[in-house]
Amino acid sequence: MTVHDPILAAAQRARAAIPDDTAMLRAAADLTRAYSTANPRIYWTDLLASALVGWGAMAGAILVDNVAIALACALVSMLALYRAASFIHELTHIRKGALPGFRFAWNLIVGVPLMIPSFMYEGVHTQHHQRTRYGTAEDPEYLPLALMKPWSLPLFIIVASLAPIGLILRFGVLTPLSLLIPALRRKVVAEFSALSINPAYRRRAPEGEFARQWAWQEAGACLFALALVGSVFAFGWKPLLVYMAIHSAMTVINQLRTLVAHLWENEGEPMTVTAQYLDSVNVPPPGTLPALWAPVGLRYHALHHLLPSVPYHALGKAHAQLIATLDEQSPYHRGNYKGMLPLVGKIARSTMAAR
């Protein structure tokens, strides 16, 4: 999308060229050294508890006949599985050897049964953090949503609601077919193997150890997708429909979170680190709802762009320290917002102004 209004275009270039704030970046570097160690006990307890509650509540939603109780179980399942699924973000940043077995366990109990194995995100998300890629056409996780047509925002959410269908087709149909048709395999790897929002993004074929991880994860997701569809013949439609409804709701919540993770005001210009921070969003306490819709540290998304190697459980402490350390004129304070609805309104107004 091209901004034709010269005033809007000039404003966009000015935002991209915001000079780096050395005090903020220096403080962030100090905190990276102080908080870079992941606590295995927190990671394992959080993941296992979230997965146990999520799958248990889904079983309740399927087995219980009382509609109100079933709906309550479905809501709990969606929130818990959403939290468990959000650890895919941590998998892309944790240092090699820091949490032995965690990647395998996450894929086994969350990634494969939700058909979002970690290969779909690993090697993709880190490109979003590259200094010269963020906000450009080469960023797999960026679109200038605030500068697009107003209808692009509801479409952005509607597409997410269809995720379970798309994933069943991706793994249950395209995976086995692509093993028989080399040209289709190349297309599947390049275009249908990344959890990205940039439709122009193309992925390279995996190599080495990552290719082996990709293979078993994709095989597992393929078998699960086929078993999910086949379950209709053994158990009827209810288990499949409940699973898909919970999965769809979970994905919509994540898409809404994605919508407010950035201001989406850049249109391809390389940005300074400070400009990238200001185009990103923190939703810190005292608000409590962000802990549900932006779990596992995702409420500190702008801070995460300053401290990508800091584990999720340390971001709250890092945020509090930066707030206390940096003066009120620091750009750090301008990256903090109160909640989802004001941010959605801000982006929606931007789309109206950019028409």
Image: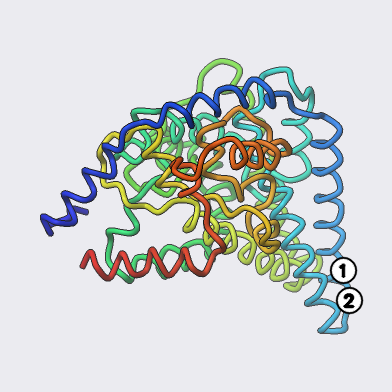
Q: Quadrant of the N terminus?
A: bottom left
Q: To which quarter of the image does residue 175 belong?
A: top right
Using residue 338 as the reference point, say whether residue 41 is left or right of it.
Answer: right
Q: Kindly report the distance in space between the C-alpha atoms of the residues bearing marks 1 and 2.
A: 6 Å
Give the image location of residue 272, x and y in percent: 34, 32
Q: Nearer the viewer, residue 84 or 208?
A: 84
Element under label 2? loop
Amino acid type, mark 2: Val
| Residue closer to the observer: 15 or 96 | 15
Q: How many discs appear? A: 2
Q: Amino acid at mark 1?
A: Gly
At label 2, counting other C-alpha atoms closer than 10 Å, the crowd grade (few under 14, some 14-19, many 20 or more) is some
- Quadrant of residue 76 in the image? bottom right
- Of 320 and 227, nearer the camera is 320
The residue shown at (52%, 52%) is 336
Write down the residue under mark 2.
64
Q: Which mark is residue 116?
A: none
- Above or below 56: residue 125: above
Q: Is residue 322 visible?
A: yes
State yes or no: discs 1 and 2 in contact (Cβ < 8 Å): yes
Residue at image coords 68%, 51%: 295
Is the residue 248 above or below the residue 136 in the image? below
Give the number of the disc on residue 60: 1
Dot 1: element:
helix
Give me the residue at 86% from left, 40% from top. 45
Quadrant into which the C terminus falls: bottom left
The location of residue 204, given as percent across then percent down, is: 41, 28
User: Residue 24 location in percent, x, y?
Assistant: 48, 32
The residue at the far bottom in this view is 67
